[in-house]
Image (cartoon, rainbow, N blue to C red):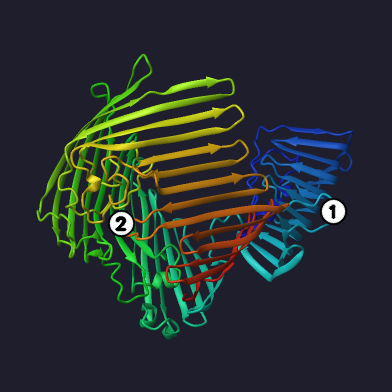
Amino acid sequence: MRIAGLIAALAACTAVLALTPVASAQTTNVPGIDLQTSPDAQLLLTANELTFNQDNQTVVARGAVQVEYDGYQMVARRLEYHQATGRLKAFGDIEMVEPDGNVIYAQELDVTDDFADGFVNALRIERPDNTRIVADSAQRFDGERTTLNNGVYTACEICEEDPSKPPLWQIKARRVTQDGTTKTIRLEGAQFELFGRPIAYLPFLVVPDHSVKRKSGFLLPSVSYSKELGAKVGVPYYFALNPHYDLTVTVSGYTRQGFLGEAEFRQRFHSGQHVLKIAGIHQLSPDAFDAGTVDAGVENRGMIASRAEFQINPRWTFGWDVMVQSDNSFSNTYGIGGYNAVTQASEVYLTGLSGRNFFDLRGFYFDIQSINPSSTDEEEQPIVHPSLDYSRTFDRPVAGGELNLNVNLLSLTRDEAEADTVNGRFPGVEGTSNRLTTELEWQRTFVTDAGLVLTPLAAARGDVYYLDVDAPVGYTGPFTTQTTPARGLLTAGLEARYPIQITAPTASHIIEPIAQIFARNDEQLAGGLPNEDAQSFVFDTSTLFQRDKFSGYDRVEGGTRANFGVRYTGTFYNGVSLRGVFGQSYQVAGLNSFATPDLVNVGTFSGLETKRSDYVGSIGVDLPRGFSMTAEGRFDEETLDLQRSDVGISYTGRYLSTNFAHTSVQPQPGYGSTTKRSELKGGASIKFAEYWKAFGSVAYNIETRTMTDNTVGFGYHDECIAITFSYSQQRDINQAVDWTVGARISLRTLGDINLGSNTISDFRNN
């Protein structure tokens, strides 16, 4: 909860004490209020009766009193101004609307014309953000100090049927004092109430007022529990060192491991910002962890991380995010925020964007956080130094068409080879590999009088390598022994599309046959070069019409290939829409790149390794009442047996929202999958009462008949509060069950309260 935000809202009541319509126009600065009045403002006062008493110098307005002054509007039953004492008094059903939208209600107002002292009785404020403030009375002394008596703040709607019923949550304080000199607010007898019940109480609390953007002090503590660490209570303290930098120090006490210290230093510059984070602990009970793990093998552990981003100019951005730690698992074990991922990537980058031109230069180091001291996963990850992507689309047409330039540079070093000898796959080779790729592509679109759309294309690509790598042990496929191999590819292509529109009284249809042909020389050194960025590949309707279907630069599609298909779009006047694609690809001539041996067998069982590819198709339907379905499939080119399918169904209605996805893939022995894979994922949310909702999700492996992930929970959500309780369970391939229980309370305008536990493992063997 941001208590300071609450106090800032309560302090807004001082605006009532900062307005007197009969005083001379002036500029007034009240703590917590930016009240600016124009010297040229005109006062408009209307009332049923206006009396001026010359003897006691008093002006009295009675009956339907209305005052308008420089954007402020006020109504009351009676208004008095005493010239001798310089005091303004208003009585009876006072209502004032401020220019910023605040609506202030009171029964009695008494204020001096210099705004130094004043009194408001039966105060109520309604703000534009739908928050409310109520106090029995408010007083202002010496122009610097304002006190609210029995103040209440809430962001919840008041029950119309029973206004005396307490809101879902509110904060009360016996006395709230705002000091304009020290810029602080003191709460006495403050308590937080939820559903009308007090759940937290503080005898007193001093916080900065909302005119102070930052102030040193304690922040909300955190609580959690885990088996190896024990119960944890973390207490952060914020240091407001300078308008441009600050520091947060957190001390977390663990019942089993002692005290963890964290410090985060943040500094903002004119062109960017930098964050430095440090954490460390002296473990009291390393033996609480499983024997033989990294966690159990060390006592003193720590990490340091640096993250920054700088805007060099509107086009260029430079930054980094790097982390080093004492061992392979510290940040993950202790959940260091932002650095607890199993695969933690450190990077340095420079990016540029101008119009349709793009530049991205990055270096990477992958930290694999593992509790296994003998793990070589991190050594098998490459150190990227660097990766460069540059794309430029030339502004001026070339031969009436569009010319694009793409450049990619990849330089990396791997300390240890990554190999899957069981399936004959070698994702990473040991040593240093460098590749520079440059490609120019030209294309132009013509539309004939008959409606035929023709797009000729020409492309030229070259790759230059510098390799200092070891041949993978056990690999029987082709692998180059050259230090500086090179390859080139020339492409000439043509795409023809003939969209046909059919309009009927109740529907509109577009049928678009598509044919492509790309004539190229064969892929040189096919499968004989390191493959770092083209290891993942799925042949479906999204890749059917791509000129190069490989996912990266390390493999390139060669030979002459033709792609044929048809695309359909249908729109019906009842709101239903249909869409679909169906097609096939043919290796017309030359070497089929998908049929050649490869370090990772990327083309094996892809559906493209034969002269005639498998058929691919997709269909989708959208109904006007929230229902949507998509289905994709790849079918064997001879038997039409289903090789891969992806089906997704979703529905969004007033009371029910749900989505389900089913994926089925036949065995791909050469690609590391020897059994059929079939998985069902789904989720649903049901609104069973006003503001109440139940939700759940599941991931089910149909082949092994096991539930891999499931979550169930329920929540309450209205205009001022959201409460969520959930239980989640995950099971890995070793049947280790990790479960978490979480709770979250979100209070509008105040913030979130998160309660839960760290992941606890329960190992079950089949």
Residue 696 left/right relative to 128? left
Q: Quadrant of the N terminus?
A: bottom right
Residue 455, located in which quarter of the rendered image? Answer: top left
- Name the quadrant containing residue 472: bottom left
Q: Quadrant of residue 189?
A: bottom right
Q: Which residue is mark 1?
A: 162
In this rendering, the answer to whether 144 lies above or below 521 is below
Q: Which callout, 1 or 2, points at the residue further toward the start of the chain?
A: 1
Measure the alpha-carbon separation of dots 1 and 2.
Answer: 67 Å
Q: Amino acid at mark 1?
A: Asp
Mark 1 closeness class: few <14, some 14–19, many ≥20 residues within 10 Å: few
- The furthest residue to the top: 449
Residue 375 spot, x, y in % from top left: 31, 73
Q: Nearer the viewer, residue 330 or 504?
A: 504
Instruction: State the SS at label 2.
Output: helix
Is residue 181 something that shows in the picture? no
The x, y position of residue 387, in whole percent, is 26, 51
- Secondary structure of the residue carrying numbered label 1: loop
Q: Name the spot of residue 757 as percent of width and height, x first.
A: 55, 71
Q: Which residue is mark 2?
A: 671
Name the mark on residue 303: none
Q: Nearer the viewer, mark 1 or mark 2?
A: 2
Say above or below: 589 vs 609.
above
The answer to whether one can see residue 456 in this image is yes
Q: Residue at x 36, y 29 (%)?
A: 514
Left or right position of 402 against 104: left
Picture coordinates of residue 434 (x, y %)? 18, 53
Residue nearer the viewer, 337 or 629? 629
Along the line of sight, which residue is nearer the eye, 604 or 482?
604
Asked if residue 234 lies left or right of residue 721, the reply is left
Specify the amino acid type for callout 2.
Tyr
